[in-house]
Image (spheres, rainbow, N blue to C red):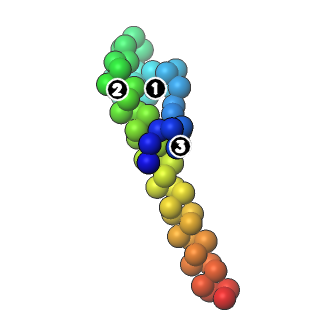
Amino acid sequence: MTQQQHPIAPSQKLVQQWMDKFYGGPGVLVSSDELYLAKQAAQWGYQKRCLEELSALGQEMQIDG
């Protein structure tokens, strides 16, 4: 899936908070590569969650059906 199909992306500010937490303090600049990876991770997590919910819904339908 492309980013245009599912434009789930963390804000620059949120990515900065993640980087500050990861590196143990503020002041680390977020590179374009790190921002890209954060966006990809957010999209992957969103898609994984959607698939888990669909799977759970399918199991509920089999039980009820």
Q: Residue at x 46, y 55 (%)?
A: 48
Q: Residue at x 44, y 48 (%)?
A: 1
Label 1 with label 2: CB-CB less than 8 Å: yes
SS at badge 2: helix
Tell me where residue 20 appears, x and y as whole percent.
41, 21
Q: Residue at x 51, y 48 (%)?
A: 46
Q: Give the distance between the C-alpha atoms of the residues marked 3 and 1, in whole angstroms.
A: 18 Å
Q: Residues within 10 Å of mark 3 (few under 14, many from 20)?
A: few
Number of dots carrying numbers? 3
Q: Which residue is mark 3?
A: 6
| 56, above or below 12, in the image | below
Taking the image as drawn, is residue 60 in sight? Answer: yes
Q: Residues within 10 Å of mark 2 (few under 14, many from 20)?
A: some
Q: Which residue is mark 2?
A: 34
Taking the image as drawn, is residue 24 in sight? Answer: no
Q: Earlier in the sequence, mark 2 or mark 3?
A: 3
Tell me where residue 23 appears, x and y as whole percent.
33, 23
